[in-house]
Image (spheres, grey):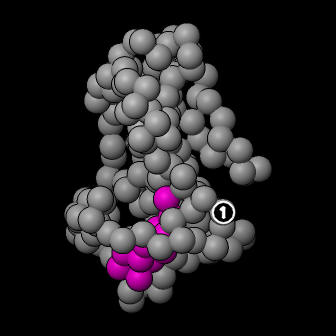
Amino acid sequence: MKYHPRSPEEEEKTKNVMLKGHTDIGSVTILWSQPIGGLQILSPDGKWRWIKHIDNALVINAGDAMEFLCGGFYPPTRHRVIQPPSDQRHLPRLGTFYFAMADDDVKLVPHEESPVLQRVGIKRLCSNDEAPTMEHWRKGRTTAYGNSVLRPGKEINVEEENIHGVLVKHWN
């Protein structure tokens, strides 16, 4: 994906955000480390933090499917893409991504037999009976993107939508 430099008018219209805060659909996302800034993660303390570039490194994000399958043990990475720092704004930013997903017919339920989950507990996003398959989750998320009416969330600067009975958040 190539992010081209934007005009001041475009930046004002989008509030310097190229892709608002979200989580990825699959189990794991692999990104090639990018020398042009823009990627940030939302840390547990509620602050957006830049992902530091390291030559020839990969950035690994957990996704929604991982959260379903591991009963919340690995929460999805909340991230966004924003305007690069001022000294890089004139440069195009090229992102290379790999999105790993479970097979379409895999039901997204926690692996209850896991000794780790038995010890720490399982945080379910929905009941096993209501859990979507990977195909239903992927299609539900991608179909809703840009078409849903997002409602204000309980947290400041968070919008929410419901997909297959599961609350999905978007961070502004």
Tell me the quadrant of the picture where the N terminus can be found: top left
Indicate the position of residue 133 as horizontal and vertical percent values: 29, 72
Examine the rendered structure and indicate whether residue 59 appears above or below residue 78.
Answer: above
Going by the numbered disc 1, the residue's amino acid type is: Ile
Prevalent SS, magenta region: strand
Horizontal side of 124 relative to 25 (left or right) equals right
Q: On the image, which quarter does residue 142 sit in?
A: bottom left
- Which residue in the structure is indicated by mark 1? 156
At a point 50% along the width and 13% down the height, the residue shown is 88
Q: Residue furthest front?
A: 9
Residue placed most toward the observer, 134 or 92: 92
Q: Can see residue 66?
A: no
Q: Which residues are magenta?
A: 160-170
The residue sitting at 41% across, 77% down in the picture is: 162
Residue 91 position, x and y percent, is 40, 12
Q: Does the segment drawn in magenta span residue 76?
A: no
- Give the answer, above or below, for where 137 lies relative to 36: below
